Image (cartoon, helix red, strand yellow):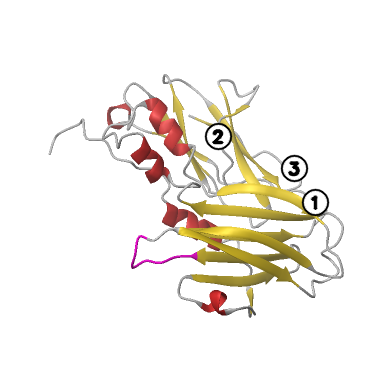
Amino acid sequence: PGNNNVYKFETIKKPCFNVMVLLSLLGDHRYTIKGGNAVRSAQLGAIATSRSGAENIVSIIFYNSDDVSSATGKSQVSLSLQNLPSVFSGDVVLAFYRLDNDNGNPYGVWKKMGSPQIPTAEQFEILRGNQDAVLVSTNTTNVVDNKIDINFEIPLPGIVLVHVCANPGTGPTVVKGVKALPKDPDTSLIPNKYQVWISWQDIDSRLLRTYEVLYSTSSNGPFTRVNKVDTISTGFMHVLNSTGTGYYKVVAVDYWGRTGPASDIVKV
C-alpha cells in the first residue's frame, strides 16, 4: 500500500479480449460444417456464419485448443465454401486473421523481454505493437462456380478467422463518439511520459481493415496517424513525451483501402 512504483499492465489487450473481437466479426446466420472427425474433435473446431444485406460476408472461425495439456503442434485445414451467392463475384476480399503464440500475444513478448516488472517506454510500445489479432492478409480472390477452396494450417493453441467479403461499393461511414481522456501523470504506467486514452464508438461494419487515430498540435493540422498497428478495437493509448494541447480525430478504412469521413475533432 502506498507504493507508487508498482505499475499495472492496463490497456494491454490480452488474447482472450482479441478472441471476443474476432467473434464480433461473425454473422447472424450459422451453418453446418461438414468434414472429417478432426472438425468435430475436442481439439479442433469451427463456427461458420454469414451476413447478408448491406454487407455480404461469410465468416468462419477455427479454434485449435487443448486446455488440459501444454501440447503444441499444427493442424492442416482444407476449407471449401460452396454455393456462394452471385454477389460474391468480382472484387471479393479474403481477410485472414491469426491469434496464437506468435500473433497477438503480448504476454509471450513480455516473457521474451525477460519478464520486466516495470517495462520501459520502449518495451511498452513493443507490447502494444503485439496486442491485436494479426490480419495476415487481405487478398482479392476469384470465385469460380460459386466456390472457394482455401488451405492453411492452424497452430495449437491457435485461432484463425477466415473472412470472405463481397465489395459493397461504398466506403465506411463517419466515426462518432470520439473522446480523449488524459491520464494523471502521477499515475502513469510509463515514467516521464504523458498518456492520452482515445476511444470512439464502433461502426456497424465487419469490413474494416483498421481505425486510424490522427493527432496534431493544431486544430488546423496537419494530422498524423499515431496508431502504428492496425486495430479494429475502439480504443488506443497515445504516449507523448510532454503535456500540452493536442487534437485528435479518427477515421475508418475498409479492406479495399477506402477511407471514411473523419470524426469531429476533440481537444485535450
Q: Residue at x 33, y 21 (%)?
A: 192
Q: Which residues are magenta?
A: 64-70
- The relative height of residue 60 versus residue 127 in the rendered view (above or below) is below
Q: Amino acid at mark 3?
A: Gly
- Residue 268, image x, y percentages: 48, 29
Q: Residues within 10 Å of mark 1 (few under 14, many from 20)?
A: few
Q: Amino acid at mark 2?
A: Asn
Q: Which circle, 3 or 1, is nearer the viewer?
A: 3
Q: Which residue is mark 2?
A: 227
**What residue do we see at 87% from left, 57% from top?**
90
Which one is nearer the viewer's eye here, 123 or 204? 123
Name above or below for residue 101 compared with residue 150: above
Which residue carries the number 3 mark? Answer: 257
Q: Assess whether residue 180 is covered by the magenta stretch.
A: no
Relative placement, left or right, of 139 versus 242 is right
Please rate how many residues cluster around mark 2, counting C-alpha atoms within 10 Å: few if below 14, some from 14 to 19, many from 20: some
Q: Which mark is residue 133?
A: none
Q: Which residue is mark 1?
A: 170
Mark 2: which secondary structure?
Answer: loop
For image coordinates 55% across by 59% down, the residue present is 154
Q: Do we see residue 92 in this rendering?
A: yes
